[in-house]
Image (cartoon, rainbow, N blue to C red):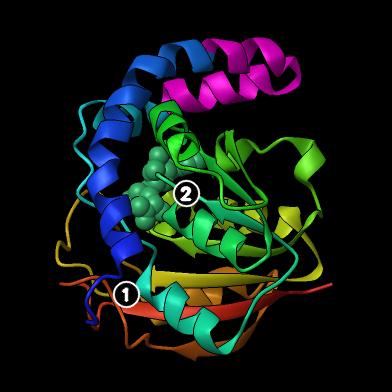
Amino acid sequence: MPSLSPDKKRERRATPKLIIRAEKQHIISKTRFFKSKQGIQNQTIQGITLMGLDWEQRYQSLDTPWDKGEPTPGLLEFLSNHPLSGKILVVGCGYGHDVRTLSQQGCQVVGVDFAPSAITAAQSFPSISDETYLIADIFNLPKELDSSFDYVWEHTCFCAIAPEQRPNYVESVARVLKRSGKLLAIFFVNPPNQGNGPPYGVKVNELDELFAPHFTLLEDWQPTQAHPGWEGRERMRLLQKNN
Ligand SMILES: C[S@@+](CC[C@H](N)C(=O)[O-])C[C@H]1O[C@@H](n2cnc3c(N)ncnc32)[C@H](O)[C@@H]1O
């Protein structure tokens, strides 16, 4: 792995302070969010109560080993050869490192996560360009987002949901993409824990079957860059929504 740039080192050092500040702010911002977004209030509360509690607790107790304090290496590798443009949704964005990377590229980016503390911390980072964040459950996204994105970027959200939710995940992603929109994704095909909780691994043939009803596979490869310890465990795919 190449060593971290001074910017990345600064971002990594800054994270704990930002999260502590975010913890104090999160009750206030959560209340404001619910008051100001009456239309999606119920969906969001339901998402947090039924499915997000554990994730929210993990963020509140700063128990977030998945956060590496930097963007996903496989995404950086892809972007170095394939600059993206247009409107991008980052699902399960956590602290938003990938959101800011895509914003830096000139994309219009929305990061979504149902853990309010993650979103508050993401919002605490200095704004790059055209990025916004939304507290919402990916299985209950606001209707206004339907057919509105050129791309969805996925890293470690698919592996965070229960395997039985995967068909709903595929439906949700297809719903928010424009006609011929694309899903760019890294899937965890070989997680270190083959057990009961996330990250839930997925087999390549399962990916083929799951996405076939709504997507055509354009490219499939193994990223050469990965977070330390994740090398060889990931599979990257570019899929296009069927019209
Ligand atoms: C393993 S973390 C990865 C976070 C981020 N992508 C990263 O790499 O640091 C999974 C994220 O997905 C979010 N998440 C899980 N299920 C979700 C759902 N149904 N709707 C929205 N976010 C969800 C969690 O809150 C958490 O932030």
* Magenta stretch, residue numbers: 31-51
Q: Is mark 2 within 8 Å of ligand 1?
A: yes
SS for tag 2? loop
Are there few (<14), some (14-19), or many (20+) residues within 10 Å of tag 1? some
Pinpoint residue 12: horizontal percent, then vertical percent.
26, 52
Number of numbered discs: 2
Is residue 59 among the parts visible in the rendering?
Answer: no
Query: Is 117 situated above or below 3?
Result: above
User: Viewer-proximal residue, 168 or 85?
Assistant: 85
Q: Residue at x 52, y 55 (%)?
A: 100
Residue that numbered label 1 is attached to? 189
Query: Is 138 situated above or below 152?
Result: above
Residue 93 marker: 2
| Marks 1 and 2, how far apart at CA | 20 Å
Pinpoint residue 176: horizontal percent, then vertical percent.
73, 53
Q: Residue at x 40, y 44 (%)?
A: 95
Is residue 44 among the parts visible in the rendering?
Answer: yes
Which sits earlier in the primary sequence, circle 1 or circle 2?
2
Residue 32 located within the stretch drawn in magenta: yes
